[in-house]
Amino acid sequence: MTHLTRLQEDESRRVILGEAVRDVQNARSGRPAARRARAALAICALASLVLLGSGCSNLLTERAAQGDRFDQPLDGLSNGELGQFQRGQTQFRRAFTVVEGLGPIFNNVSCASCHSGDGRGNASNTLVRFSRGTDLDQSEGGPQIQDRAIPGAEPEQLPAGVDVSNRMPPPVFGVGLIEAISDSAILAHADPNDADGDGISGRPNYVTPAAYVPATEPGSGTSPRIGRFGRKAQVPALLQQAVEAFHQDIGITSPYQPAENVNPLASRVVPDLDRAQDPEVGEGEVDDVLQYMRMLAPPSPGEWTTQRRRGETLFSSARCNVCHVPSMPTGPHEIDALAYRDAPLYSDLLLHDMGDGLADNRPDGSADGREWRTAPLWGLRLVREFLNGGMLLLHDGRAHSVDEAIRLHGGEAAAARDAFIAMPAADRAALVDFVESR
Amino acid sequence: MSAGRASWRTALAAALLLAASAPALADAPQARVRAVEPPPAPLPPPEPVFGSPYHGREDGIAWGGHGDLRLGYDRVRGVANPEWFSVERVNGFFEARLHPRILIAAQGAYDRETDDFVFERAELGIRARDSWEVHGGIFLAPLGRTNLEHDAPRQEFGDRSLVATQLIGVPYAEVGAGVRGGARSGAGCPVSYELDVVTGYDDGLVMDSPGGTRLPRGRNNYGDKNAIPALAGRVALHPSARTELGLAAQSGQYNATRVGGVSVDRPRYVHLVVADAGTEVAGFRVWSEAALALIDVPPGLKPLFADRQWGGSVELARTLREPVFRAWKSTSLTAALRADAVDLDRAIPGDSRNRLSASLNLRRLPFAVGRFGWYYEVLRDRFNNGTPSAGLTLTVASYF
């Protein structure tokens, strides 16, 4: 930073020399120095105005178009709800430190570090679930491996001989709409015994909510409720999903789960390693995250084109839409923006046998090892944008394109898959284009 | 006629003077001085920092300070930041020369980058010889020129470079003791040096660091949490009055191996190397700084926490007018451009920041500066998703 030495030069010498230079300048230009300086300043001012005016949008960054992001709030929220949305977004993005309670065992440091832009995760943050038959195997660290640990703690290792299921973090947006869909709307698509004989027999995953879920929360209760969240629809209440993510994924205790998650197979347990008092977050912080997720809007679908309309027709003719139901109505909800709307999720939220190829042989709730909840297709349009051009589909991200994902369908979806494969290439391209525009 | 001839001669002399000196008018004062009195390439003084302009001085005691205010219009991904005004830095210092060879110095600052009050100096220096001194207390770690000199009025930009703020953690002061001084290399080139035993970074660089390894979170100038000192040092060559080449490093254990009497980890080290260089080329003042950090991360925190980070910054500045107007004595108009980048995790494509900054500065030499700046930055998360931010800023910094 040698220019700094200039500042320390004797001021009087500076003045003398400055005047000498000025004289030289005047002589060279034949114009008064002040005039030139004013001209220079005027040019700078003009450039600034140009920058402020016409170039602002490019030089000062541009706002993403409405519907082009995963982290935008629903339309129609009140000011109070938007305030909570902002607080929740801060909590959602908050990266916990060891000092703040991270761990002792954990998978990642924040909600946002698994859900890219509030969308899907990638291979680096895939969760590993395991069980022994129907036993979620908590005595051996189940139902999920925490493969990271703070100093002094031991990360979990996968026990031998267990059933393993890798799970990509799913998108977070739109879960409020999923929560608001009425039971009757979901059950209207259920056909557990394939009474219509079409080979597709969707059924809900009835699971009992965690005892800590208050009765005021949707999906709460002491009896089994329809599961809506998770790859096997194994979670009935959004609050439970948030609390479990705090506890299992980040190692953060809350009033709902106040005891630390520890590695039961560790050679030793050192208490108070994470330096924070339990519970490490309060009900308010959990609620902010919960409401944030509820109020996240699904992105808008892409523009209709001739090819996409044709793709939609083919999507229906191949009977993809039997499971990937384009839209379901929501019922009443305490957030007006979620109540009585169409949720264009392209899912029936039901369990379907997807065949041996996709089976993880790991039951969850009433879902068996071959069943998966129909994956919503909304937001596929933007997946590549938030995964650096990649597209990791299916529960474990094994499919790198919609075409590949369809080809990996089996079980109840085998007929739809075969219909897709039998299509001419142009038709397949139209169908894929339609799906990727959702 | 004679007046016209005189004017012509003046112009010719001026042209010759300009051609002989340098392309930039900013160079002219230096060139003129050199023509009269070739510089003897003095030894660098062993003083800890360049002397700051002081508010008052009496009986060997000097005191002063500086402040830095920022007005900004900042946008992140097109959304304006409501915080349009901030106090970036308020600094106060005090120096007392108890004896021609003994100096006590204290300096504290509120710094927005750290969002905290920081003791930058509480130091006793004893000059053992004319060319070197021993010192101890709290002092700025010799990790690059930026950390040693970051008084706001001296800077060409309203904010410091990313490598300074995100990697080194400027301002970074530590508790320690050491020697500093000047010497000559074998070729006669002046060399300044400093070698210290210091507290070093603590385990906050991973344990209190949200989202990944961040060395600035391990700054600690109030004591050493693990009682294991680190070694810090810097050597700088001064081939000419306006050229400096510096190389600095710090190495030490950062973690505490026991918690509550129970062994929880083995000793882990952080090594930081900082190189800086400054000179003048074709009328431009060029300055750059680069840093590389190697961190021994506990295995349970890998790969979320980086074990290698680096960053660099290049800054160009040119004086456009000096003085700006005839009546404005001791003023200058300067344009500056800076490109800087940090990669906070070399193992993945993301977790990085890149920024381009431009600034037009009006100085009242040497005390104050008003800067009109623009910046554009892209922050990449660990998914490598980019978040652009940009802003127009007006910053005013002055000694008082």
Image: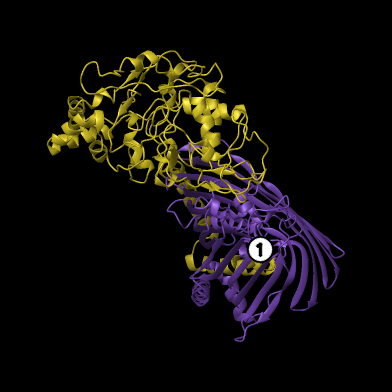
In the rendered structure, the answer to whether residue A246 lies left or right of residue B45 reads left
Q: Is residue B187 above or below residue A109?
A: below
Work out whether residue B321 can be spotted: no
Say what amino acid the circle numbered 1 marks: Leu
In the rendered structure, the answer to whether residue B324 lies left or right of residue A198 reads right
Where residue A44 sits: x, y (%)? 49, 51
The chain holding disc 1 is: B
Q: Disc count in the image?
A: 1
Q: Is residue A310 above or below residue A214?
A: below
Q: Identify which residue, B237 or A159, lies in the foreground.
A: A159
Residue farthest to the left, as pictured: A424
Q: Is residue A244 above or below residue A31?
A: above
Where residue B221 sits: x, y (%)? 72, 56
Q: Identify which residue, A302 or B184, lies in the foreground.
A: A302
Q: Residue at x 47, y 51 (%)?
A: A43
Identify the chain drawn in yellow: A
Residue behind mark 1: B148
SS at mark 1 in the image = helix
Look at the image and tell me in which quarter the N terminus of chain A lies: bottom right
